[in-house]
Every structure is written in C-alpha cells, then in structure tokens.
Image (cartoon, helix red, strand yellow):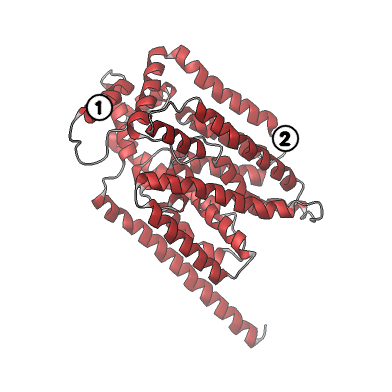
Amino acid sequence: MSTTSAQALSASDRCALRSNRAIVILWVLIFAAVPIAVVFSPPGWDVVVYRNAIRSLKAGHDPYLDSIAAQKVYYSQAVHPAGDPPFNYVYSPITLPLLRLIGALPVWFSGGLYWLAYIAGVLSAIWVATLALEDNERPYLLYFAPLTIYFPGGLANGIVLGGNIAYIFYGVVLLAAVLGWRRGTWIWFYLAVLAASCFKAPLLSLTVIPLLSARKQWIPASITTVAGIALFAATPAIWPALFRHYLQSLQFQFNYNHDFGSSPAGLFSDALHNRGLPYSPACIFIYLAYAIPDFALLLYLSRRFLQGYFSLKQWMPVLLLGVILLNPRLIEYDLAPVTLLLVLIAWRFLAVFTTPLRIILCLALLFLATNSIALQSWQLGKLTQGPLLILYFAAGCWPLLKQSLPAAVPVPVIAAYS
C-alpha cells in the first residue's frame, strides 16, 4: 500500500472514529436526560396501572371494577388533583393469571426484571430499524437513532417513560422478524405476536409481516390469526363476569381519556365522540376504507419484492409502516419502533432531488414545523401525527412503485435479503 493510500485510509478511520464517538456521546446524553425528565414528570404511569391490578388480584378484588371505581371518583370531583388522571387496566382477562404469578414474586425482583426487559425492548426496536440503513446512509442517520426515543413518530413525547408493555412486545416481535428474514424461521415470530395479542388485540395485525416479506407464510399466518381470535372469543366463556367488566373498562378509557389514537379511524372516532355522536360502527367503515387499500398496496409491493425488484433494506421501512397503519388505534408507543424508519423514508424520498446536507436542512425544518404545531396541545399532536403518517407512507411507496414498473430490472435474489 502506498504512503498516500495509507494516509487517506488513516484520515478515513479518524473520521469514522470521531463519528462513532459523537454517536456514543449522543446516546449518553439521551440516557442522562431520563433523571432530568423524571423530576418534571413522575415515570412509570403505565407500570402503576399494572401494579394496581396486581394489588387488586392479591386482595381478591376485580381489577377492572377497582380501576373503574377510581376513575369515577376522580371525575366526580369538581376540582381534579394535580397530575395524570387514573388509567384503567384494559387488557383481556386472559392476562390475569400472569399477573397473579408476578404478584407472587418480590416487587423488587419482578420490577427489576420488567424494567430490564423494557430497556431491552426499546433498544432492540431501534437496532432492528438500523438494519434497513444502506452504507451511505448510516453516517447520517445513526445520529437520529437515539433521538427517536423521545420523538415517537417524529413528535416530541415522553411516553417512553410510562413503561408501557408495548415497547417490550415490539422489541421481541421485531427481533423475531429479523430471525425470520435471516434464517427463514418464523415460529418464534408467530408465538411472540400471539402472546402480544393477548394483551393488545390489535397487535395481531403484525402477523402479516412474514406474509409480506417471505414465501409460503399464508398458512402459518392464518393459523396464528385464527388462534388469536379464538383466544379472544373464548375469554367471555371462561371468565364471563371479568370479560364484561373488561369491556366496561375499555369504554371508560375512551369516554374519560379520549384515548382513540392518531390513526385515521382513531381521529374520526375522536371527532364523533367530541360532538356527542356514537363513533361505532361508523369508525369500522372508515378503518376498512383505508386498511383494505393499504393491505392491497402492501401485497402488490411484497410480490414485487419477492420477485427481486428491490431489497429488504428498501422494503422494510415501507413494510413496517404500512403494517403499523393496519392498527386501528395508534398510540405513540406503536409509532416508536418505526420512527427511525420514518426518517429513512423521508431521507430516501428527498435524496432523489437533493444533497445530504440539504436533506438534513429539510428534515430539520419539517421537525420544527410539525413539533411547533403538535406541542400546542395533545389534540393538535394527534391531528398532526395522523396525516404525517399517511404522507410518510406515500413517500415510501412512490420509489418502490417506480422500481416495480415492467421496465425495471430485478436485483439479484440474494440482494433482496441483504
């Protein structure tokens, strides 16, 4: 190797080392911000809900009725106490045996295990998202990875401090998806989704990920979906009283907390609810009106992906965002796993027209504009998030559709899974 080449390599290495150090420092600052945030907002509000449900079970009570009673007391007061309102336990009765098991463990032990799993889930989802980055994108977009923790969906929100179990499920499901993509083994993915659906039924929609990114998955995906529906359908037969109270708890959650999410169906339901109108079954038709075209487009693109017109790195951001949009109720923790992928979609869309530095400027302006609106109120945040997701999805589909034209040349099969 010549002296000039050695010097050039050395300069390149030094640049990469500085970049890595900067990214590490950014991660340190992100984690250092946690105790600062805790001072202004008590963390673990979702974990408190789980812990209260465990206490109710240990006392021989119905956790749904206890949480409903707490909400009634809170909202019957003329002046509400400072802080967040009480939240209901809104997971199916099929989860209660697990809560009883956890309740038999020391609090420090079960709590420690939970928070370790929680941190692992948050970081795992971000790591999976980085696998979609091309080599020429990594030097820029790796800086965004730690920032996504406090900006789920691209909008500032501290929901990560709440400790919602969704972060754990998304981390496990996405890690299992990577196993499926790399080794063709999808059994762990289906088991993870089935377990997640026992807590959050809409997560059963994640079963379409292997269906849209691997061959011969129609039967296992269908079996998993039917099994998830069967588990839910069997619940009222096994725990009839608890199931009725569970549905009441869900209804109270919507009536008092207006927690409809930022999906198109959720925004529509919220608009009807605010006007005193029934949101069901109209919201079902709104959901089907966009979910069916969404899935049809994903299905078309997946066939082109399997034919080799674009790689998994190109397909993954659009695939996961499109699948997330199939969830009829999108809360910030549902968007957290795809936040870096949203940035990647915007980056690739803008890269067709301009340079990396100008892309960064455009993303910064988009970030400032959307957050300046969303931070005005919780409601405006939802109204901002919903349309943004649709724009990101359209921006992600556009280049893939261009690559899927008959004149396009398929990439080698091995590159489709790179």
Give residue 16's position: percent from left, percent from top. Answer: 53, 72
Image quarter in which the N terminus is found? bottom right
Q: Which mark is residue 216?
A: 2
- Counting residues from the N terminus, which is met first, the one under dot 1 or under dot 2? 1
Q: Amino acid at mark 1?
A: Ala
Viewer-side residue, 260 vs 312: 260
Furthest residue to the right?
Answer: 407
Numbered label attached to residue 105:
none
Indicate left or right for 34 with 301 as reference: left
> Residue at position x 51%, y 32% from top?
202
Q: Image height check: is 296 above or below 60?
A: below
For the residue pair 168 and 110, the one nearer the viewer reads as 168
List x then y, in percent, for residue 285: 56, 29
Q: Which residue is mark 1?
A: 70
Q: Nearer the viewer, residue 378 or 167?
A: 378
Residue at the image position 39 percent from the left and 47 percent from the top: 380
SS label for mark 2:
loop
